[in-house]
Each structure stands twice: as structure tokens, then as C-alpha cells.
Image (tube, rainbow, N blue to C red):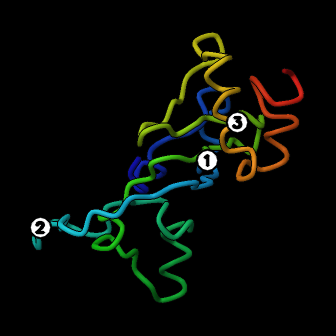
Amino acid sequence: MKYRLLNYIACPYCKDPSFPLKLVVFEVRRYDERKLPEDMPRPLCDLYCGYLGKKIEELRKEGREPPCDECIKYEVVAGILICSICNRWYPIIDEIPRILPDEYRNREEDLRFLKQYADKVPEEIKLHGKPFNLSTT
């Protein structure tokens, strides 16, 4: 998952109030050969810089611009997206965020993911995350 995706996504249940989703990165991959074209307008993200975990307006108040040329080189391979409103979580598996409504989630796959990364998953998700958590096993 590209960090800049956080600029565009929200919880399918809570929508805008959940923006931005909290990102917890478990594994990241760097691609040194990736470069943005010189003529591409920057910043790539208009509201939120997922790479730095800050709103664009916050960065500008600090006198900084998002480091798009560095951000483009990274992919989140494994991690978790968390909605701070409803406590739903969405896994990132093999660089793909699985942002699905509860009825389309695979319980066994989600629980396997939580167990695999149990040492990295925040406690609130392990114990109370929706739709599944380790206390529901």
C-alpha cells in the first residue's frame, strides 16, 4: 500500500469523521529506483501525508513540505488500518489494504492475521477490534 492512499480512504462505516485512518506499519519495502517526474505537481497528497502521519496544513505551519520524492519509494507490505471512531480494523496483506464491510470479511483469515502479528497489533484491536478480535476466538 502506498502511503499516499491514506489521503483518500476512510472507514466504510464512519466515512469522513474517521479520516485519516490510523496506520500501524509492520513491514515496509523500499524501491530505490522509483522517482517522480520533475514536472509532476507536488505535493501528491492534498489533505494528509501518510508518510509523515500529519495533515498537509500542519506541515505547512511548520514550514515544511511533504517529502513526496522519498515517500514514493516505499510500500507498506504488512500493517493495519484502524478507525478511531468505531474501532474497526483493516489488514494490509501483501501490499493490499483489505477495506471491506464486515459481511465480506473472512473471519479465519483476519484472526490468522491478528495472531501472526500479535506482538505488533495495538492492544485495543487485539481485545476489542471489530469485526473480529483475539478475545472472540
Q: Residue 38's quadrant in the figure?
A: bottom left
Question: Which residue appears at 40% of the width and 74% of the height?
Answer: 66
Q: Residues within 10 Å of mark 3 (few under 14, many from 20)?
A: many
**Residue 14, position as x, y percentages in the image:** 67, 32
CA gap between label 1 and label 3 equals 18 Å
CA gap between label 1 and label 2 equals 28 Å
The residue where tag 3 is placed is: 114
Whichever of callouts 1 and 2 sits on the residue coming sooner in the sequence is: 1
Name the mark nearer the viewer: 3 or 2: 3
Q: Are marks 1 and 2 in contact (CB under 8 Å)?
A: no
Q: Is residue 45 left or right of residue 90?
A: left
Secondary structure found at label 2: loop
Of all residues, the one furthest to the top in this rendering is 103
Label ID, residue 37: 2
The residue where tag 1 is placed is: 21
Q: Amino acid at mark 2?
A: Pro
Whichever of callouts 3 and 2 sits on the residue coming sooner in the sequence is: 2
Judging depth in this view, the residue of 78 and 102 nearest the camera is: 78
CA gap between label 3 and label 2 equals 38 Å
Whichever of callouts 1 and 3 sits on the residue coming sooner in the sequence is: 1
Q: Are marks 1 and 3 in contact (CB under 8 Å)?
A: no
Q: Is the C terminus in the top left, top right, bottom left or bottom right quadrant?
A: top right
